[in-house]
Image (cartoon, helix red, strand yellow):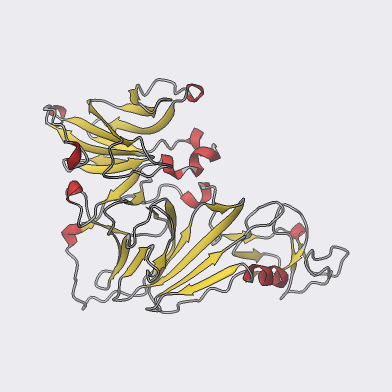
Amino acid sequence: MKDDYNLHLSLATCITGEKDIFLYNVRGIKVEDMDISQGFYFVRQNKGKIAKISQHSDIKPDKGEELLFRIRKSKNKNYSIESPICKKMENNKKCISNLNNKLWYILKSSSNKNRSNNIENYILNKNDIIKIGDSKYEIIEKNIEEKDNNEENDYDDNNINYLDLNDQYNISKNNKSESIFNITKIKKADYKNENENNLCRICFDGSSSIENPKLVLCNCHDYIHYQCLKAWIKTKLIKRENSKKTVNSYILKKFNCEVCLKPYPLKFEIPEIKKQYYLIDLPILIGQNYIILESLGIFLDNNEIKMIHIVKLTDEYITIGRKEYSDIMDNNYHISKEHAVIKYNKKNGDVILENRSQNFDTLVLVKKPIIIKEKEIDLQIGKTIITANLTNNKLINTYPFSYLQ
């Protein structure tokens, strides 16, 4: 029966605007429809045209061809779509670091009827990456102490996304912007616990102790006291707490060496003395349910800016947007005043992301192949939105947006 089905793709590319943001309600939308009966690679050519090529063909970057995604057809006739992640590409840091060229799942807005087939809510998991406008956040930590089975469920399970977008590889390890939550182990050669001629480059003192060790934490190979560096970073730190006292936000400016630009680790360990150190004192939510979001890839004047949001999960939902009273405030130009919300379901412990924006998307990074079933699905890659659905050998022009029909 599956032999009777083809895969229909509608590719809507925004040819206006900037960066990798899809702008709705504009005239500069180019739509291409394709009917697929076998596996193909899809590339963007130098003039912006999207073309399908054989899986056995060579991609020619020197001629402007950019690999976008791949369609597979399995032996049991199932179609799947995936980002072009392979061993060859994992060694190419530029390919891995550019998350805009990966597939993103689009969450529909409850007030946007143009994409009524998409699932409105998404259950967040650790290491999920979400994109709001052109800001990206990774769920660094997710801590659920207990679930309240006696709590009434306010959410309809049929409206919750159980689509498996979870990790096959840790994106933080491959992304240009490595998480500052990773523990860095200090080599023996980069740690001094005695008075020597190697002076701290901040205080010019050569002393060292277990509480205030002298370390090498960047590529400059200069020693620096733990307490000196911690005091310097504190001057670059901006703290903000929302009115509901459920979100503590930290904006870290110049969290990297000003000379070699290598980011400093938030926490590191000296194996020789079996002790861990923290450069920033973040609140510890003992016995509480919370998630931690960390920004990815924000640079200003060659310095990496980090935003960390520690979110306490309560009955009240968390708003993300440009409004000054948003719980998580992001001043990015392509973010709506109230762009998305995070809700906590006490009954089953789910942390739910919901889109509220009509003009811009809320996206979740797809990190493993998605099997395309009868239900229509919308994905985004760069400035192109892909609408995929199965057809029973009868071509039906299914556009992603009603105004294109």
Q: Quadrant of the C terminus?
A: top left
Residue 278 shows up from this direction: no
Residue 340 lies, in percent from the top left, at: 32, 61
- Image point 16% across, 58% down: which residue? 158
Where is residue 142 shown, x and y percent of the image?
Answer: 40, 66
Query: Which residue is located at x 75 percent, y 53 percent?
Result: 220
Residue 398 at x, y percent in the picture: 17, 35
Outermost residue toward the front in this view: 27
Q: Quadrant of residue 70?
A: top left
Residue 185 placement (x, y as % from top left):
64, 60
Up the image or down, 104 lies above or below 7; here it is below
Q: Quadrant of residue 81?
A: top left
Say left or right for 396 vs 306: left
| Image position of 178 (left or right of 145) | right
Q: Quadrant of residue 23 in the image?
A: top left
Q: Nearer the viewer, residue 393 or 2?
A: 393
